[in-house]
Image: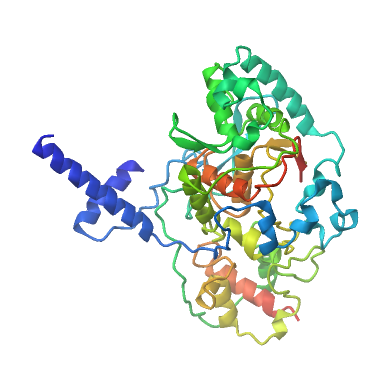
Amino acid sequence: MKITLLALALGGLTAAVPAVADEALPSNLLYDASKEKKTLWPQPVKNSGELKYNEHRQDLSKWPTLSYEDKRPTRKPEKVQLQEPLNGNIENGKKLAMNTQRGNCWACHAMPGDPQPGSGGPAFLNIGTWGYTDAHMYQQIWDRRVANPGTEMPPFGTNGVLSDQDVRDIVAFLQSLK
Amino acid sequence: MKTSARITAIALSGLALSLGAHAQEVYRDMTPTIDYGSKPQASDDTRHTNTYQYWKDNAKIDPARASSLTEFWTVNWKYKDAPFNDTLHGGHDAQDRGQELYKQLNAKGAFAACLGAKKGELKGLRLQYPQFRKDMNRVVGLEAMIEHCADKEGMKLVNGSYDNSAVSVYITAFSNGMPMKIDVSKGPLKESFENGKKLFHTKAGWTNFSCATCHVSVVGKNLRGQTPTTHYGDVAHWPTWRTKDELQSLHVRFTECNRNAGIQPLQLGSKEYTDIEVFMTALSNGYPVVNPSQRD
């Protein structure tokens, strides 16, 4: 990191400061490049003065961290236009929306059949009757900051969490909730 | 100083300045900061979630509120603490283990002195942390200091390990009932507090969440199986025994918070986690230490 910073500073003397390359990670992450998932988590082991490190289920180092060395900015809000027709798969959309490790929409939004509905955002039990266009929903899931800069909703498209087809499928599922 | 050396020094300081300016310019989404004041304390929660009235006294927790599916979060998990919770749990085993290790470490009295215990007195020692150490030139939490001082005695107690936290539980328990009190109104602790406050509200990870996303913006909302509680009054019971059968220090918990929020965890004892620890400790000022303790 130090070498990168120096390079950045030197670059800054002659031109605008370039974006930090993805491989320039802060030095104080729980991270092991030689592991498949790369991101590690610490596990205390009873009656031991050492920690056991396990791989997390995904590489989280790809997004900005809380490290003071991290010079990656928050990705800017992306305004997108849905290319019609929607061609969304309702069943797959349901699998993405009601899955804790994928879209995880149900963490905040109540959805039909969930015995412990989330209340962090509006309930989506009948969102298909609200009159939203597919394009509006697509934008909201891709990056809701375009409409509301202070939103707590993750920018699923901008941050590369869900693909174009993933978002289409979720829009189709939400429109089917009536 | 020779001229060439002086020019180099000037150039280097210029570099440092431009680096500093660059660091300021990196744009990060933030959750708006609430008013924490310059001398925060646990009771300030009345300005935030206004649940302080329900958890300020461990001995007077309302059982009906604590068992209510919609209201339990307003008790801020304090029904897990003694005297409301009178069960024996893994935290007590850790306390015993901590005592064994402490006796080995402090055979000559140097370990207690290294931690800052006057005449080996452990009562109140927990309240002195986090603190700025001139000799180490940084702010340290109790667990970081246990690692540092154990190392001097030839024992490896990695920050966040079971044995490190066990020693911390043993030491912390001597301060049971004593109100937390760190002064963040001046000096390095103020700087650490301000940094921690900013970090707590800085968005990160694939979710673009900050700590405050859950503990300020959607506090008290149901996130399916979880309901985030206030971040006030939360530090007085750490390290704690988690019901998944794991003894966790506050920094180990931070790595779990980070992962739950889709954010890359940092090293235990890092400046970042220590700053957040200072911030959260100040928000527990005035709240009594409870340890051993248990949490979900």
The one nearer the camera, A53 or B208, is: B208
Position in image of residue B237 (x %, y %): 71, 41
Outermost top residue:
B108
- Write down the quadrant of residue B162 in the picture: top right
Q: In the image, residue A147 lies at what x, y percent?
A: 53, 78
Residue A118 image-quadrant placement: bottom right
Residue A132: % across, % down: 63, 85
Q: Residue at x 47, y 76 (%)?
A: A79
Residue closest to the eye, B278 or B47? B47
Q: Residue at x 85, y 41 (%)?
A: B83
**Residue A124 visible within the image:** yes
Could you tell whether B63 is left or right of A9 in the image? Answer: right
Q: In the figure, is residue B133 to the left or right of B141?
A: left
Left or right of residue B287, residue B282 in this image? left
Q: Position of residue A145 (x, y in %)?
A: 52, 73
Its colouring scheme is rainbow
Is B291 drawn above or below residue B10 in the view shown? above
